[in-house]
């Protein structure tokens, strides 16, 4: 495989939203790029996460690519918050339109990437032993692609089918009438639980940490709305550019602590009744930074769980105690709480009766064994750095990225890593993350500008300078200070109790807001990329 591709300009790892767009932009520069993808087709997150109920929490019409008028005109989102099959169909549609698959190789997982300093050449090795080389390597790995199974003994012993939600069987699985056990209560589990609870014989949910959740309020897009959306795309994307998270929602300038109880509760009631993330990122501006404001919101949200769950003891169990409302990524739900009013659903608090092991028949807790036909692991991901840790990436002198980043990634603008020339990252650590495709397009466009600059100036090699990296990492840390969310364990703060060495919080995103992030990266480009060294 090495020989015919010797003339490649770039290798892109990943055929998700990032890799697809990067390929498109590189072609626009006349570059020869090759995408390597572990899955059998495009789609990334939307290819892998086929569990029942998987869908957007972003408004569909704010989520799609914005770069092509043709795609915007032709594609019709069926629902305000698109379900996984439709999103995957959308990405396949985009791949067809731009004939992207022609430069993609599927079914191969990159296991290593080594940089040859003398030749300025990256060589990637795939799980079938094949290699491929090019001067530029783009990691379009996705922040949530390294799924993690629970570190519970006996996983191999279970006799029935068992799946992580990110590896749901393509052909689906009939859960009707079955006894199903699910571990986890994050955004994925919440979608899965509320969807399968109607069909299964009995569902047992193993909960370690409850999460706050608020209603999604999804519905189909009417023909009138479709026409309206299509006529307003420019306005919608401009709105996303102006918000801190690139969603259409923006924090309310008022402070919860300065309003009367009646005023703030009326606002919260309104947000609770509206679709999307308004209740999270469109809340009063002090809710996610001031512990007093957050406590007020948390108390109000607690009341909502009590209203919706009939049994007060179960409502109590479903109420988070270790973090305030919105201080972890807020799952949106559609009837999640009401599921626990059903006779065929049991909630097991594994803090009271811990799981001892997985057995042939099911899950044994300290008090009893629960027997199942099917087990579901909705146990999340080794976020952001996990996908990088799983590839043996070495730079000049054998410098290993995984070791360099153990305590904290060292990036410049989240798009290049210190000590790793010509390694371009899309949505790696230290970039703004919210409405993901909006972030991706911005990063890919910026990287395309960098590549254009290199070409115009006859450079073939780029790496970040040490001092700007130190400044950037400091700035990233400072931007996260004072956010309540930085003080809570989650994938976003780099904690995963199933992964050795990942118990300590790290700042893995840029939390100064997307607008500020854009200003920073645009300033670097306008200044002639002085923070980078070129050859
Ligand atoms: P997650 O939020 O990390 O949740 C994982 C769940 O599994 C947690 O409840 C965790 O409990 C539990 N768990 C993990 N290991 C366990 C163990 N050994 N024993 C018992 N419980 C264990 O992962 P996720 O739900 O997959 O969501 C990850 C992210 O994906 C979300 O935050 C979101 O950004 C994205 N997502 C988006 C959508 C959407 O757009 N609609 C949908 C799904 C996911 P602890 O909290 O105690 O660790």
Image (cartoon, rainbow, N blue to C red):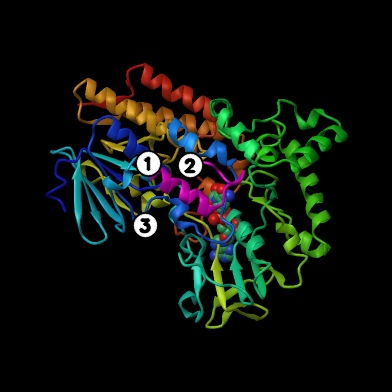
Of the image marks 2 and 1, the number of the one nearer the N terminus: 1
Crowd rating for badge 1 (residues with CA inside 10 Å; few <14, some 14–19, many 20+): few
Q: Mark 3 = which residue?
A: 39
Residue 97 as seen in the image, left or right of residue 164: left
Of the image marks 2 and 3, the number of the one nearer the N terminus: 3
Would you say residue 136 sits in the magenta stretch?
no
Q: Mark 1 = which residue?
A: 97
Q: What residue is rendered at 50% in x and 68% in y?
A: 163
The image position of residue 334, as x and y in percent, is 69, 53
Crowd rating for badge 3 (residues with CA inside 10 Å; few <14, some 14–19, many 20+): some
Residue 124 as seen in the image, left or right of residue 516: left
Q: Which residue lies most toward the front here?
A: 223
* Figure disc tally: 3
Q: What residue is rendered at 29% in x and 31% in y?
A: 28
State the mark number for residue 123: none
Comparing 215 with 280, the one in front is 215
Q: Quadrant of ligand 1?
A: bottom right
Q: Quadrant of residue 453?
A: top left
């Amino acid at each position: 495989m090495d020989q015919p591709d010797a003339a490649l300009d770039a290798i892109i790892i990943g055929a998700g939203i990032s890799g697809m767009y990067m390929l498109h932009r590189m072609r626009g520069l006349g570059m020869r790029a090759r995408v390597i993808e572990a899955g059998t087709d495009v789609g990334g997150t939307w290819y892998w996460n086929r569990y029942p109920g998987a869908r957007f929490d972003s408004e569909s019409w704010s989520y799609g690519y914005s770069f092509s008028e043709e795609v915007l005109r032709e594609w019709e989102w069926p629902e305000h918050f698109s379900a996984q099959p439709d999103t995957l169909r959308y990405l396949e549609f985009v791949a067809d339109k731009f004939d992207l698959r022609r430069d993609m190789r599927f079914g191969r997982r990159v296991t290593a990437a080594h940089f040859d300093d003398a030749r300025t050449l990256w060589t990637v090795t795939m799980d079938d032993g094949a290699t491929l080389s090019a001067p530029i390597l783009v990691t379009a790995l996705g922040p949530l692609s390294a799924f993690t199974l629970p570190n519970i003994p006996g996983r191999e012993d279970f006799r029935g089918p068992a799946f992580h939600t990110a590896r749901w069987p393509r052909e689906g699985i009939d859960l009707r009438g079955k006894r199903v056990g699910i571990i986890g209560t994050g955004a994925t589990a919440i979608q899965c639980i509320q969807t399968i609870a109607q069909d299964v014989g009995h569902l047992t949910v193993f909960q370690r940490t409850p999460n706050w959740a608020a209603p999604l309020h999804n519905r189909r897009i009417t023909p009138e709305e479709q026409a309206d959306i299509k006529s307003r795309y420019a306005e919608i994307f401009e709105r996303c550019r102006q918000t801190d998270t690139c969603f259409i929602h923006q924090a309310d300038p008022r402070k919860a602590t300065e309003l009367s109880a009646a005023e703030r509760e009326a606002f919260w009631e309104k947000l609770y009744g509206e679709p999307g993330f308004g209740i999270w990122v469109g809340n009063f501006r002090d809710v996610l930074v001031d512990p007093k404001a957050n406590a007020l919101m948390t108390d109000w949200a607690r009341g909502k769980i009590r209203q919706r769950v009939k049994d007060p003891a179960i409502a109590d169990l479903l109420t988070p105690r270790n973090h305030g409302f919105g201080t972890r990524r807020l799952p949106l739900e559609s009837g999640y709480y009401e599921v626990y009013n059903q006779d065929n659903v049991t909630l097991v608090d594994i803090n009271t009766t811990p799981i001892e092991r997985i057995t042939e028949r099911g899950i044994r807790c300290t008090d009893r064994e629960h027997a199942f036909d099917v087990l579901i692991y909705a146990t999340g991901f080794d976020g952001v750095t996990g996908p990088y840790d799983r590839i043996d990436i070495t730079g000049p002198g054998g410098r290993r990225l995984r070791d360099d980043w153990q305590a904290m990634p060292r990036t410049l603008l989240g798009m290049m890593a210190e000590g790793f020339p010509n390694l371009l990252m899309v949505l790696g650590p230290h970039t703004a993350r919210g409405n993901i495709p909006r972030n991706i397009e911005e990063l890919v466009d910026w990287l395309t500008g960098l590549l254009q600059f290199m070409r115009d100036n006859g450079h073939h090699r780029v790496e970040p300078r040490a001092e700007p990296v130190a400044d950037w990492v400091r700035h990233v840390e400072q931007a996260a200070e004072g956010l309540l969310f930085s003080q809570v364990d989650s994938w976003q703060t780099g904690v995963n109790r199933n992964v050795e060495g990942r118990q300590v919080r790290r700042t893995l995103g840029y939390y100064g807001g997307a607008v500020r992030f854009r200003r920073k990266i645009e300033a670097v480009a306008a200044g002639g990329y002085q923070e980078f060294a070129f050859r």
